[in-house]
Image: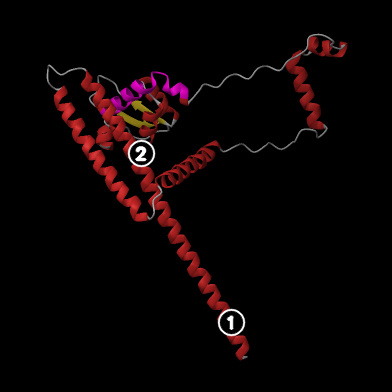
Protein backbone atom coordinates (compact mmCIF):
# COMPACT_ATOMS: atom_id res chain seq x y z
CA UNK A 1 0.00 0.00 0.00
CA UNK A 2 2.87 2.41 0.75
CA UNK A 3 4.45 1.68 -2.64
CA UNK A 4 1.11 2.21 -4.37
CA UNK A 5 0.58 5.55 -2.60
CA UNK A 6 4.11 6.70 -3.49
CA UNK A 7 3.58 5.75 -7.14
CA UNK A 8 0.19 7.47 -7.21
CA UNK A 9 1.70 10.64 -5.72
CA UNK A 10 4.29 10.62 -8.51
CA UNK A 11 1.68 10.13 -11.25
CA UNK A 12 -1.01 12.55 -10.07
CA UNK A 13 -1.35 16.23 -9.30
CA UNK A 14 -5.05 16.38 -8.32
CA UNK A 15 -7.12 14.32 -5.85
CA UNK A 16 -9.22 12.89 -8.70
CA UNK A 17 -6.13 11.66 -10.55
CA UNK A 18 -4.76 10.30 -7.27
CA UNK A 19 -7.89 8.15 -6.95
CA UNK A 20 -7.47 7.00 -10.57
CA UNK A 21 -3.80 6.16 -10.08
CA UNK A 22 -4.55 4.04 -7.00
CA UNK A 23 -7.46 2.33 -8.75
CA UNK A 24 -5.13 1.53 -11.65
CA UNK A 25 -2.81 -0.27 -9.22
CA UNK A 26 -5.64 -2.26 -7.63
CA UNK A 27 -6.59 -0.09 -4.64
CA UNK A 28 -9.60 2.01 -3.66
CA UNK A 29 -9.00 5.22 -1.75
CA UNK A 30 -11.70 6.48 0.59
CA UNK A 31 -11.62 10.10 1.72
CA UNK A 32 -15.20 10.84 2.66
CA UNK A 33 -15.36 14.25 4.42
CA UNK A 34 -18.09 12.89 6.72
CA UNK A 35 -15.71 10.23 8.03
CA UNK A 36 -12.94 10.90 10.50
CA UNK A 37 -10.16 8.91 8.79
CA UNK A 38 -9.15 8.34 5.18
CA UNK A 39 -8.74 4.69 4.22
CA UNK A 40 -7.28 2.50 1.50
CA UNK A 41 -8.23 -1.05 0.60
CA UNK A 42 -7.62 -3.56 -2.15
CA UNK A 43 -10.11 -3.82 -4.99
CA UNK A 44 -10.33 -7.62 -4.69
CA UNK A 45 -11.42 -7.48 -1.05
CA UNK A 46 -9.83 -7.19 2.36
CA UNK A 47 -10.19 -4.79 5.23
CA UNK A 48 -9.78 -1.05 4.79
CA UNK A 49 -6.62 0.36 6.38
CA UNK A 50 -6.54 3.84 7.85
CA UNK A 51 -3.82 6.05 6.42
CA UNK A 52 -2.31 7.06 9.73
CA UNK A 53 -1.46 3.40 10.38
CA UNK A 54 0.90 3.43 7.38
CA UNK A 55 3.13 6.10 8.90
CA UNK A 56 3.56 9.84 9.16
CA UNK A 57 4.48 10.21 5.48
CA UNK A 58 1.18 8.70 4.34
CA UNK A 59 -1.42 10.74 6.19
CA UNK A 60 -3.95 12.77 4.25
CA UNK A 61 -2.26 16.14 4.86
CA UNK A 62 1.10 14.90 3.56
CA UNK A 63 -0.52 13.41 0.46
CA UNK A 64 -2.28 16.72 -0.19
CA UNK A 65 1.06 18.52 0.08
CA UNK A 66 2.68 16.13 -2.41
CA UNK A 67 -0.18 16.56 -4.85
CA UNK A 68 -0.03 20.33 -4.41
CA UNK A 69 3.69 20.28 -5.16
CA UNK A 70 3.09 18.27 -8.33
CA UNK A 71 0.38 20.74 -9.32
CA UNK A 72 2.77 23.65 -8.91
CA UNK A 73 5.49 21.90 -10.92
CA UNK A 74 3.56 20.09 -13.65
CA UNK A 75 0.02 21.47 -13.71
CA UNK A 76 -3.33 19.64 -13.52
CA UNK A 77 -2.71 17.12 -16.36
CA UNK A 78 0.21 15.14 -14.94
CA UNK A 79 -1.73 11.87 -14.95
CA UNK A 80 -2.64 12.22 -18.64
CA UNK A 81 1.00 12.94 -19.48
CA UNK A 82 2.22 9.78 -17.77
CA UNK A 83 -0.74 7.59 -18.78
CA UNK A 84 -2.01 8.87 -22.13
CA UNK A 85 -5.39 7.46 -23.20
CA UNK A 86 -5.36 4.80 -25.85
CA UNK A 87 -6.34 6.06 -29.25
CA UNK A 88 -8.71 4.02 -31.36
CA UNK A 89 -6.98 2.36 -34.27
CA UNK A 90 -8.19 3.63 -37.66
CA UNK A 91 -10.50 1.37 -39.55
CA UNK A 92 -9.12 -0.54 -42.44
CA UNK A 93 -9.66 1.17 -45.79
CA UNK A 94 -12.30 -0.52 -47.89
CA UNK A 95 -12.55 0.61 -51.49
CA UNK A 96 -16.08 1.23 -52.61
CA UNK A 97 -15.36 0.97 -56.32
CA UNK A 98 -14.35 -1.95 -58.53
CA UNK A 99 -16.26 -4.51 -56.46
CA UNK A 100 -17.20 -7.78 -58.06
CA UNK A 101 -20.77 -9.02 -58.34
CA UNK A 102 -19.95 -11.89 -55.93
CA UNK A 103 -18.79 -9.43 -53.25
CA UNK A 104 -21.94 -7.35 -53.64
CA UNK A 105 -24.06 -10.53 -53.42
CA UNK A 106 -22.43 -11.64 -50.15
CA UNK A 107 -22.69 -8.16 -48.62
CA UNK A 108 -26.38 -7.86 -49.52
CA UNK A 109 -27.55 -11.34 -48.44
CA UNK A 110 -25.10 -12.15 -45.64
CA UNK A 111 -23.77 -8.79 -44.47
CA UNK A 112 -20.14 -7.92 -43.92
CA UNK A 113 -19.90 -9.64 -40.52
CA UNK A 114 -21.52 -12.84 -41.77
CA UNK A 115 -19.23 -12.86 -44.78
CA UNK A 116 -16.18 -12.50 -42.54
CA UNK A 117 -17.37 -15.32 -40.28
CA UNK A 118 -17.89 -17.54 -43.31
CA UNK A 119 -14.40 -16.72 -44.49
CA UNK A 120 -12.88 -17.60 -41.10
CA UNK A 121 -14.87 -20.83 -40.98
CA UNK A 122 -13.48 -22.08 -44.30
CA UNK A 123 -9.97 -20.97 -43.36
CA UNK A 124 -10.35 -23.03 -40.19
CA UNK A 125 -11.59 -26.08 -42.11
CA UNK A 126 -8.75 -25.84 -44.64
CA UNK A 127 -6.13 -25.58 -41.89
CA UNK A 128 -5.04 -22.07 -42.81
CA UNK A 129 -5.87 -20.74 -39.38
CA UNK A 130 -4.51 -22.53 -36.29
CA UNK A 131 -7.10 -24.70 -34.58
CA UNK A 132 -5.46 -24.34 -31.20
CA UNK A 133 -6.02 -21.23 -29.21
CA UNK A 134 -3.01 -18.99 -29.01
CA UNK A 135 -1.55 -18.59 -25.51
CA UNK A 136 -2.52 -15.38 -23.81
CA UNK A 137 0.02 -12.87 -22.59
CA UNK A 138 0.43 -12.83 -18.84
CA UNK A 139 0.38 -9.07 -18.47
CA UNK A 140 0.71 -8.95 -14.64
CA UNK A 141 3.84 -11.08 -14.88
CA UNK A 142 5.25 -8.87 -17.65
CA UNK A 143 4.49 -5.74 -15.60
CA UNK A 144 6.27 -7.27 -12.59
CA UNK A 145 9.31 -8.16 -14.70
CA UNK A 146 9.37 -4.70 -16.25
CA UNK A 147 9.07 -3.09 -12.82
CA UNK A 148 12.05 -5.13 -11.58
CA UNK A 149 13.99 -4.13 -14.71
CA UNK A 150 13.29 -0.44 -14.10
CA UNK A 151 14.42 -0.86 -10.50
CA UNK A 152 17.69 -2.51 -11.56
CA UNK A 153 18.35 0.20 -14.15
CA UNK A 154 17.66 2.93 -11.58
CA UNK A 155 20.08 1.33 -9.10
CA UNK A 156 22.76 0.93 -11.79
CA UNK A 157 22.38 4.56 -12.89
CA UNK A 158 22.53 5.71 -9.26
CA UNK A 159 25.81 3.87 -8.57
CA UNK A 160 27.29 4.91 -11.93
CA UNK A 161 26.42 8.60 -11.61
CA UNK A 162 27.85 8.97 -8.10
CA UNK A 163 30.95 6.84 -8.82
CA UNK A 164 30.95 5.12 -5.43
CA UNK A 165 34.33 3.48 -4.78
CA UNK A 166 33.01 0.93 -2.28
CA UNK A 167 29.92 -0.38 -0.58
CA UNK A 168 30.70 1.63 2.55
CA UNK A 169 30.55 4.82 0.48
CA UNK A 170 26.92 4.07 -0.39
CA UNK A 171 26.17 3.45 3.30
CA UNK A 172 27.72 6.79 4.22
CA UNK A 173 25.74 8.49 1.45
CA UNK A 174 22.51 7.09 2.93
CA UNK A 175 23.45 8.57 6.30
CA UNK A 176 23.81 11.98 4.65
CA UNK A 177 20.41 11.57 3.03
CA UNK A 178 18.81 10.74 6.38
CA UNK A 179 20.33 13.87 7.90
CA UNK A 180 18.96 15.99 5.06
CA UNK A 181 15.51 14.44 5.54
CA UNK A 182 15.60 15.21 9.27
CA UNK A 183 16.57 18.83 8.53
CA UNK A 184 13.73 19.23 6.05
CA UNK A 185 11.34 17.60 8.52
CA UNK A 186 12.29 20.18 11.13
CA UNK A 187 11.79 23.04 8.65
CA UNK A 188 8.40 21.70 7.63
CA UNK A 189 7.33 21.29 11.25
CA UNK A 190 8.27 24.91 11.90
CA UNK A 191 6.23 26.03 8.88
CA UNK A 192 3.26 24.01 10.12
CA UNK A 193 3.47 25.84 13.46
CA UNK A 194 3.51 29.18 11.69
CA UNK A 195 0.49 28.18 9.57
CA UNK A 196 -1.59 27.67 12.71
CA UNK A 197 -1.47 31.39 13.43
CA UNK A 198 -4.31 33.59 12.29
CA UNK A 199 -2.03 36.07 10.50
CA UNK A 200 -0.08 33.35 8.64
CA UNK A 201 0.79 34.32 5.05
CA UNK A 202 -0.61 32.06 2.29
CA UNK A 203 2.89 31.44 0.88
CA UNK A 204 3.58 29.04 3.74
CA UNK A 205 1.38 26.36 2.13
CA UNK A 206 3.49 26.47 -1.03
CA UNK A 207 6.70 26.26 0.98
CA UNK A 208 5.36 23.29 2.91
CA UNK A 209 4.40 21.58 -0.35
CA UNK A 210 7.86 22.17 -1.82
CA UNK A 211 9.53 20.77 1.29
CA UNK A 212 7.29 17.72 1.09
CA UNK A 213 8.34 17.18 -2.53
CA UNK A 214 12.01 17.44 -1.59
CA UNK A 215 11.53 14.95 1.24
CA UNK A 216 9.79 12.56 -1.14
CA UNK A 217 12.65 12.85 -3.66
CA UNK A 218 15.27 12.20 -0.98
CA UNK A 219 13.31 9.21 0.32
CA UNK A 220 13.07 7.86 -3.23
CA UNK A 221 16.83 8.23 -3.67
CA UNK A 222 17.40 6.57 -0.30
CA UNK A 223 15.20 3.67 -1.38
CA UNK A 224 17.24 3.26 -4.57
CA UNK A 225 20.46 3.33 -2.53
CA UNK A 226 19.08 0.71 -0.13
CA UNK A 227 18.15 -1.52 -3.07
CA UNK A 228 21.63 -1.10 -4.56
CA UNK A 229 23.26 -2.11 -1.27
CA UNK A 230 21.08 -5.21 -0.94
CA UNK A 231 21.70 -6.19 -4.57
CA UNK A 232 25.48 -5.82 -4.20
CA UNK A 233 25.41 -7.89 -1.02
CA UNK A 234 23.33 -10.63 -2.69
CA UNK A 235 25.68 -10.63 -5.68
CA UNK A 236 28.73 -10.99 -3.46
CA UNK A 237 27.10 -13.77 -1.48
CA UNK A 238 26.11 -15.67 -4.64
CA UNK A 239 29.63 -15.25 -6.03
CA UNK A 240 31.08 -16.57 -2.79
CA UNK A 241 28.81 -19.62 -2.82
CA UNK A 242 29.58 -20.23 -6.49
CA UNK A 243 33.32 -20.02 -5.82
CA UNK A 244 33.00 -22.46 -2.91
CA UNK A 245 31.09 -24.89 -5.11
CA UNK A 246 33.75 -24.63 -7.80
CA UNK A 247 36.55 -25.23 -5.28
CA UNK A 248 34.70 -28.22 -3.87
CA UNK A 249 34.18 -29.60 -7.37
CA UNK A 250 37.88 -29.13 -8.15
CA UNK A 251 38.89 -30.85 -4.89
CA UNK A 252 36.61 -33.78 -5.65
CA UNK A 253 38.18 -34.18 -9.08
CA UNK A 254 41.67 -34.03 -7.59
CA UNK A 255 40.79 -36.68 -5.01
CA UNK A 256 39.30 -38.99 -7.62
CA UNK A 257 42.44 -38.66 -9.76
CA UNK A 258 44.68 -39.44 -6.79
CA UNK A 259 42.62 -42.53 -5.97
CA UNK A 260 42.75 -43.72 -9.57
CA UNK A 261 46.56 -43.29 -9.61
CA UNK A 262 46.94 -45.22 -6.36
CA UNK A 263 44.90 -48.08 -7.82
- Residue 38: percent from left, percent from top: 28, 27
Q: Secondary structure at mark 1?
A: helix
Q: Nearer the viewer, residue 21 or 224?
A: 224
The C terminus, quarter of image? bottom right
> From this viewpoint, is residue 49 visible?
no
Q: Which mark is residue 83?
A: none
**For the view shown, which residue lies furthest in the left direction?**
198
Helix, strand or loop at mark 2: helix
Q: CA distance from mark 1 to mark 2?
A: 54 Å
Which residue is at 75% across, 17% downward?
Answer: 114
Q: Is 157 above or below relative to 204? A: below
Tell me the quadrant of the picture where the N terminus can be found: top left
Return the x and y of residue 77 as percentages of the image width and height. Answer: 42, 19
User: In the rendered image, which residue does mark 2 sit on?
Assistant: 220
Q: Which mark is residue 256?
A: 1
Image height of 175 relative to 241, above or below = above
**Circle 2: is it few (<14), some (14-19), or many (20+) Cα within 10 Å?**
few
Q: Is residue 39 visible?
A: yes
Which percent across, then down, holds residue 186? 19, 35
Residue shown at the point (38%, 34%) measured from the top left? 4
Q: Is residue 27 above or below residue 169?
A: above
Query: Callout 1: few (<14), some (14-19), or many (20+) C-alpha neighbours within 10 Å?
Result: few
Amino acid sequence: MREAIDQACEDASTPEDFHRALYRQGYIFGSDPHRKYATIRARDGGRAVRLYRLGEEYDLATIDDRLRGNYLLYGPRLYELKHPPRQNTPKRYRPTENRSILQIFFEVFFGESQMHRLYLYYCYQLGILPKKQQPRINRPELERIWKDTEKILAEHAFVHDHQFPSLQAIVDYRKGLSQQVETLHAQRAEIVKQMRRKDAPPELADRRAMLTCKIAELRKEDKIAEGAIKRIQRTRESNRIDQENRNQHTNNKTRSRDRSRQR
